[in-house]
Image (cartoon, helix red, strand yellow):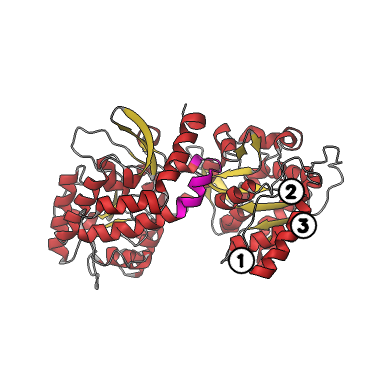
Amino acid sequence: MKKILSVLLLIAMLLTGTVALTACGNKNSGGDEINMDIDLSQKIDLKVLIPYSGKSIEEVNSNTNAKLIEELTGYKVTYTQLPASDASGTLNTEFMSETPYNLIKLTKDQFSDLVKDDLLVDITDALEKFAPDILANISEESWEVVTVDGRIYGIPERASSDNIENPIVLNYDLMMQLNLDVPETLEEFEAVLKAMTEELGAPALTFDKYTPLIHTVSAAFGIHSFWQEYEIDGKKEVRFYMNAPRYEEYIAYMNSLYNKGYIDVEVSTNDASNAVNRFVNGFKGGSGAKAGAYACSLWTVSSIVTSLQSNDVISKEEAAGELDDYLCYLRALKENADAPEKVYRSSGYSYVTAIPFYMAENAGYALDWMNSKIKDTEGEDNFRQIVLGEEGTHWQKTSEGGYMPINPAFAEKDDAHIFLNGTNENKYTDYWLARVRKQPELFRAWSELMEDADEVGVYNLADFTPPLGDYNVYRSSVEEYAQTQFYIMLKEGTGNLSTILNQLNNAKGCAKATEDINNWYKDSYKK
């Protein structure tokens, strides 16, 4: 049934120019059963489709990490990658053509679309036989993301670390000149911005056009993540942040800062490089547009350090160390001094690796290959070799028992993530921190932001959903609309908020997405 419909769909696509997929057959249709009796000692060559890597496919296949994986697993693998643009359209075409990929590394949205159309192999029963190490090293929470009606359809790849990573970076050198303390409350933050703005002769706070929720500020209004649980009229429910009880107060506060001249008027058009330049120009000797505070990602810190050095604010030697006299990190403001601190903590799943239905026969080999890569024991440390390399060559132990990169050899591991298909969740964060340690100031920032992370962190619940019909359909339109409206309300205030929320919830589908997430949360996720 699936093969016949795939051919018909391909013909329809060629005639109409569409790349839409529709439901195909059922999970028990012939031709998509896993052969449980294969001989794993007779390994086959594998063909793997990956997302666009930023490199040519020739570079991918000749990569040092790809060669290492072949040596460790015994499998010869040929990689193909999706294009940078219209990846989903190309992916649909590949499925309709039944291109023989043993494995496909998918975004979470792509996985949701394909599993909805019944185009992926149910690997539930095969995992125990072919992938026991994967079962042992991926959490139950992660398996829920790839489970539909009690059956597993992919290998989840969880984020390398659950990070608190959206601070406001402050020009601490300027703060010391002005005798300012690091703010803790909304009132104190406004006072700092006022003093910085007056000194710089320019709005103190900058950010880019992709930052509709300033987590440091919204935290003071009880808004921490995109989707979280709120208690409303004695009942608890999950809402999108624009529907949070105090979202109007958050916008009013930001609008007030904007009207007082404390927020960069170019935020709606800034890209990251514009914002970095403004922030760096706010240091002594800087010229051009200036700022003293920058709401950004933690991972922007390395760019800030590089720019400070290139603009002669700091020396090469200073750039190689910690910059506690220049930078400080504000992770969450509080409404008042007695309020508890809570802040957004990121997590989620970058990719899911799955097997096309028409390649089910040899799924055991594909699972065995992935299982070999995730092994990490005293006698078989494949995963550590893939992501970290060899001790004494790529890394060495720190005095605290962590992993310190050895440069320049460690650069060979910069591309290792391209070749992951699921991770050893029990060990990956410790290994991943070697990358953070490459830049001392970045590691200092991460360490400060992660203090008491388990107590203060609030997750985005949508990061942990399995495929959900209405949420998956409306997610993009909801997020894009929210971003657009934030920059309008930042300048114009909350006068049209009721109309905006009505559009969000009805025309943009947020009400349906909210119902979907709440049904999942109450029935499956909430402990």
* 385 left or right, relative to 345: right
Looking at the picture, tell me which residue is in the foreground, 159 or 64.
Answer: 159
Cα–Cα gap, marks 2 and 3: 10 Å
Q: Is residue 31 magenta?
A: no
* 42 left or right, relative to 201: right
Give the residue type at disc 1: Pro
Front position among marks 1 and 2: 2
Q: Which residue: 24% across, 47% down?
A: 248
Give the residue type at disc 2: Phe
User: Could you say which disc has been placed on residue 227 in the image?
Assistant: none
- Which quarter of the figure has residue 489? bottom left
Looking at the picture, tell me which residue is in the foreground, 82 or 242.
Answer: 242
In the rendered view, tell whether residue 133 sits above or below residue 77.
above
Q: Which residue: 73% across, 34% down?
A: 125
Q: Which residues are magenta?
A: 464-476
Label 3 residue SS: loop
Looking at the picture, tell me which residue is in the foreground, 475 or 197.
Answer: 475
Label 1 residue SS: loop
Find disc 2 in the rendering and name its residue. Answer: 357
Give the residue type at disc 3: Pro
* 146 left or right, relative to 399: right
Query: Which secondary structure dominates the residues rendered in magenta?
Result: helix
Instruction: Pick whichever of labels 1 and 2 is earlier in the sequence.
Output: 1
Find disc 3 in the rendering and name its residue. Answer: 100
User: Could you say which disc has been placed on residue 83 in the image?
Assistant: 1
Residues at marks 1 and 2 touching, judged by CB atoms closer than 8 Å: no
Residue 437 in view of the camera: no
Residue farthest along the bottom direction in this orientation = 288
Label 2 residue SS: helix
Residue 222, x across and y down, in percent: 28, 39
Count of all numbered marks drawn on residues in the image: 3
